[in-house]
Image (spheres, helix red, strand yellow):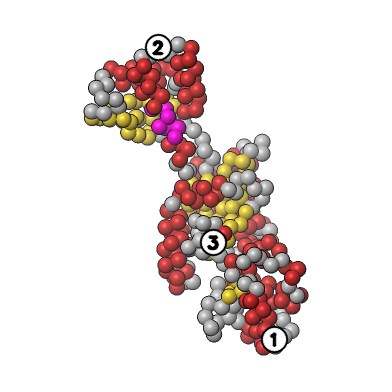
Amino acid sequence: MPTPPVTELTNRARDIFRLVVEEYLSSGQPVGSRTLAGAGQVNLSPASIRSVLAELESLGLLAAPHTSAGRMPTEIGLRLFVDGMMQVAEPTAEERAAIERRLSQPGPIEHALEATSSLLSDLSAAAGVVMVPSREPRLSQMNLVPLAPGKALAVLVGEDGNIENRLLDLPPGLPISTLEQATNYITAHLGGRTLAEAARVMGQQIASGQSALDAASRDLVERGLAVWSEDATRRPVLIVRGQANLLDENTLLDIERIRQLLDDLENKQSIAELLETAREAESTRIFIGSENRLFALSGSSVIASPYRDREGRVVGVVGVIGPTRLNYARVVPMVDFTAQSLGKLIG
């Protein structure tokens, strides 16, 4: 069902709808007519309020989880509220100071990114996520170690000290000397380069006949670089913190939904793909429930904003994942401010 424009609602229906959504986002509970009447913000009887609630329900903006319960906004209703009615509240001075203080602590950028994820989790009472800039490691050395007939271990050592291993298939009967030749070539000629740079240099040297490698060794070097380059593009670099915040008293009443959400959070590849869609956004993006395939079953929302370096290039995405009853008006500007602060740090 398409979201009806705000202008199609009467002033009375718009006011009551806004109150229902704001109360629901605050309490997490369905809102009844007596609650609205008792709040003193609607000058109508409970019976008249119920009539308006029924109208809003017929438009698909509200739903009643039980016959005798109050109403709560549907995903369509939340989208209408977020796009056309929400009044965002800028982060408080204390929140801004907390964000800047956490990000200004000394240490490598990886620590700041982890701090960002934890900070968003703490401030939003949901799960904080940061998609890390995809930075290719620079090679210090790559060793090709024989394991068994037809198998070798490609050991990549980065200049930052990180060590990772990958299995590599070998042609039958390949002599150990070929592995040694390929290893020595990589160490001597390709050290200090990224994988992409190493592959480009390798291609140029082969084309010009300068590689001084036989065909078998060239093949090993090329395939060794290829397996690492391919792996780097597939491996999401994602930091998720604060999953425990999702286990509040309301979600525990719907244990299957929260189980699905935690399963979704474990699938970092899918989350990275979702956040990737926010990279080209000019500002913060909001995904509500089944609007994104990943969280269709768990009915969760994502608030995500790209962060840029000082030259304006998008280098990553920060965000919050939580139930659809997130306090959007507070969390959206908080995520946006965090993205701006992190961008200044990236430089």
Q: CA distance from mark 1 to mark 3?
A: 32 Å
Disc number lying in front (2 or 3): 3
Q: For the C terminus, give its image quadrant.
A: top right
Q: CA distance from mark 2 to mark 3?
A: 57 Å
Residue 57 visible in the displayed image:
yes
Looking at the rendering, the stretch of residues picked out in magenta corresponds to: 224-230
Type of amino acid under label 1: Ser
The disc at residue 212 is 2
Q: For the N terminus, give its image quadrant.
A: bottom right
Q: Earlier in the sequence, mark 1 or mark 3?
A: 1
Magenta stretch holds residue 8: no
Q: Quadrant of residue 19?
A: bottom right
Type of amino acid under label 2: Ala
The residue at 67%/47% (across/down) is: 282
**Element on which disc 2 rests:** loop
Which residue is denoted by mark 3 in the rendering? Answer: 290
Residue 19 visible in the displayed image:
no
Type of amino acid under label 3: Ser
Q: Quadrant of residue 289?
A: bottom right
Which residue is denoted by mark 1 in the rendering? Answer: 48
Q: Earlier in the sequence, mark 2 or mark 3?
A: 2
